Amino acid sequence: MTLLQHIGKYTLLINRAFARPEKPRMYYIQIIREMVALGINSIGIVAIISFFMGAVITIQTAYNTESPLFPSYLIGLAARDSIILEFSSTIVALILAGKVGSSIASEIGTMRVTEQIDALEIMGINSAGYLILPKIIALVIIAPFLTLLSMIIGVFGGWLAGVSAGVITTPEYIYGIRFAFIPYYITYSLIKSVVFAFIITTVSSYHGYYTNGGALEVGRSSTMAVVHSSVVILLFNLILTQLLLS
Amino acid sequence: MIEVRNLYKSFEDQDVLKDISVSFEQGKTNLIIGKSGSGKTVLLKCIVGLLEMDRGHIFYSGECFTEMSAKEKKKIRQKFGMLFQGAALFDSLSVEENVRFKLDMFTSSSHAEKTKRVNFCLEKVNLKDTNLLYPSELSGGMRKRVAIARAIVMNPRYLFCDEPNSGLDPQTAILIDQLIKDITEEFNMTTIVNTHDINSVMEMGEKVVYIHNGEKRWEGSNLEIIDAENKELHDFIFASGILRHLKKDEI
Ligand SMILES: Nc1ncnc2c1ncn2[C@@H]1O[C@H](COP(=O)(O)OP(=O)(O)O)[C@@H](O)[C@H]1O
Ligand SMILES: [Mg+2]
């Protein structure tokens, strides 16, 4: 299939996913389930990665700017901006593409090859809507919170590492992260996280939904889901940065 | 009653079904038989609309299913019950939730009423007190029975079964066949069963359609099938050898 055909098929599927639900109550229950499965269960990995990235960014910035002309508090500022602008939205999205994307594709793919999707359709249920829409809504709601959490933990990790390594003092760091602070950067990052959440859930659902064959193909779909979500995220990162920051 | 008229179906490079016309009767277990790969599953999926056919028409009690709008199709599907080859239970839901699912989606009865209905259906398939188990905790035969309970929970008028006893031991297989036959008669449904199992044919084949290489080659009842004058069907039926001996003895 050509790229254009994939995009067409993807668009039709997502369109179907947004059809009016048979019974909204059943969808609410699914959304809550998915928020737990996709969001809450990702808190751990997001926290660990954010902490270490924050720490590394701070220490690297410090060693790269060892100059008497460069005031130490700027280390805090630089760490803050890289965490907020790029790392807490894009890197976290890439991590989620790996964790959430593969689990969505293999769950839906397994349902496809074991005829569970056919079972839904035969009951007169819109399988695309029932399976995909709750995942989109759940991750779109929860992704900004994960991003905020990542920012907080990242900045905290930077402080802990910076102070323990002796490259910056606590007052300098705090001064630095408050210096010339632009609140819009946070908005920008949260907007990106919502778009990325949509990309991860829809691209992965697409790969799962059109799995053809057996267990082997489910594995393949799940790999494709991660690869394609990541590429699309990077592409949209570029587009959004251009649109939102210029 | 379900009527199929001049159905054709092909995949990219392969004609799978060629000019199938057949009618399936109400209150009876209608069998589609044929060896693996002959097109039984594809035929059943075309009949219920899970696969698009290339040409032909399907009628449900005289109404043309092929020409219905998506909305009308959704509506008539609520009168369908289907048993898939691998049972296709929802892994993430318990036995009770699986059987309840359709009630939750389409009815507004109270929780107690739904539970009562679920328990009634589970009792019908001899699975009392398994409500809280998950599909992964069940044996193959139990899964099939849960799937039957799920299929009949909304009193379907049409029941479709794809190889209901594949992968089961002979005793369990016969129980499942019996169950399908009894339910069909009790609720006066139009039932279509795909099978390649000769025991099933003898057990419940009030109406049998034989498919070979995607073409209909024979139809009749299980009483007539032994004497059918059709080479492939004859080979198919007597492949087991035991039956062949029986027939010889009879002569
Ligand atoms: N989705 C599909 N794509 C391509 N070919 C298919 C598909 N489904 C079934 N077929 C082909 O159609 C033929 C009939 O298959 P099927 O109806 O599953 O046989 P059976 O009688 O064993 O149920 C087989 O040759 C199979 O390879
Ligand atoms: Mg089959």
Image (cartoon, coloured by chain):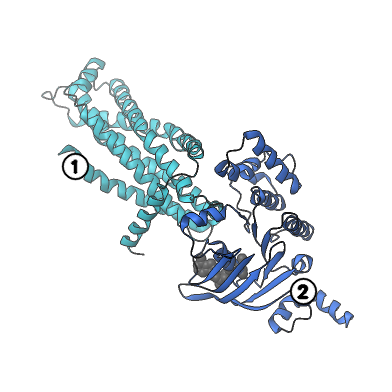
Chain colours: A cyan, B blue
Specify the amino acid type for callout 1.
Leu
Which residue is depicted at the point 47% across and 57% down? B70
Rendered location of residue B50, percent (x, y): 52, 61
Quadrant position of residue A87 = top left
Q: Residues within 10 Å of mark 2 (few under 14, many from 20)?
A: few
Q: Is residue B214 above or below residue A184?
A: below
Residue lying at 67% horizontally and 73% vertically, measured from the top left: B209
Residue A243's tag is 1
In the image, is B210 to the left or to the right of A89? right
Residue A95, compared with residue A164, is above or below; it is below
Q: Kindly indicate the quadrant of the structure image that contains residue A241.
A: top left
- Residue B240 - label: 2
Whole-percent x and y of residue B153?
65, 47
Q: Give ligand 1's quarter of the image.
A: bottom right
Residue at mark 2: C-beta within 8 A of ligand 1: no
Between residue A207 and residue A57, name the one nearer to us: A207
Query: For numbered disc 2, what is the local secondary structure?
Result: helix
Q: Given contact means CB atoms under 8 Å apart, are the residues at marks 2 and 1 in contact? A: no
- Quadrant, the N terminus of chain B: bottom right
Figure check: A129 above or below B114: below
B2 over A164 or under it: above or below: below
- How far from the left and from the top, in percent, is residue B71? 48, 54
Residue at 43% over, 31% down: A44
- For badge 2, the amino acid type reads Ser
Query: Front-most of A148 and B228?
Result: B228
Residue nearer the viewer, B102 or A45: B102
What x and y, as percent, mark residue A65?
A: 17, 29
**In the image, A227: left or right of A128?**
left
Of all residues, the one furthest to the front in this rendering is B62
